[in-house]
Image (spheres, rainbow, N blue to C red):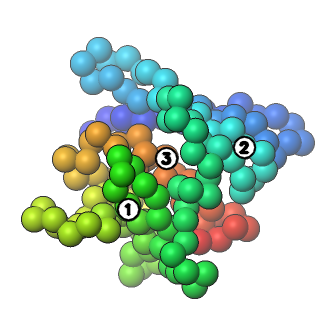
Amino acid sequence: MPSLSKFYHPLIAGSDSGVTYFERMNCATSLWEPAGHVEWSSNHSANVYFGLERVPLRELRRLKKTTSKSRRFKANGTDYRWKLADNGFDLICVSTQISAFGRNVAEWSNERSTLRVVERFEPILDRLVVTCILNLWMKRTAAGW
């Protein structure tokens, strides 16, 4: 399957700030379209823009408790959370609402570098992709999981 999202971050020597742009593939036109950007104030602090909507990074990685092993975010009024899979490398996104369709929303495979999203959650695809990437970034840096 082809990539549906891509990220671009111009390097600025000696800076831990800057802007990361993300685009989505329009499958009808086969063209890349802007989806938003991340304005970094440091390696671990940023504002994320989904179109015109501004969301602080901390709102896309909320903790329920200080000992929590998952990171929560909201999309279209519903709460979701990314949690580490049992292998400690993969990520699983679940809806906090129980539905007839199950709770799993998306899964990141570290081994295959693949994010799979349940089809009915395509309306929040940008938010799922960005929160997955941000959580992977934080997991691999000093901020930790």
Q: Secondary structure at mark 2?
A: strand
Residue 107 in sight here: no
Image point 61% across, 81% down: which residue? 66
Q: Nearer the viewer, residue 5 or 123?
A: 123
* Horizontal side, residue 112 vs residue 69: left or right: left
The answer to which of marks 1 and 2 sits earlier in the sequence is 2
> Quadrant location of residue 38?
top right
Q: Nearer the viewer, residue 103 or 16?
A: 103
Q: CA distance from mark 2 to mark 3?
A: 14 Å
Image point 50% across, 29% down: which residue? 51
Residue 48 place in picture, x, y as percent:
59, 42
- Mark 2 burial class by Cα count in 10 Å: few <14, some 14-19, many 20+: some
Mark identifier at residue 130: 3
Q: CA distance from mark 1 to mark 2?
A: 23 Å
Residue bearing mark 2 = 40
Residue 34 place in picture, x, y as percent:
49, 24
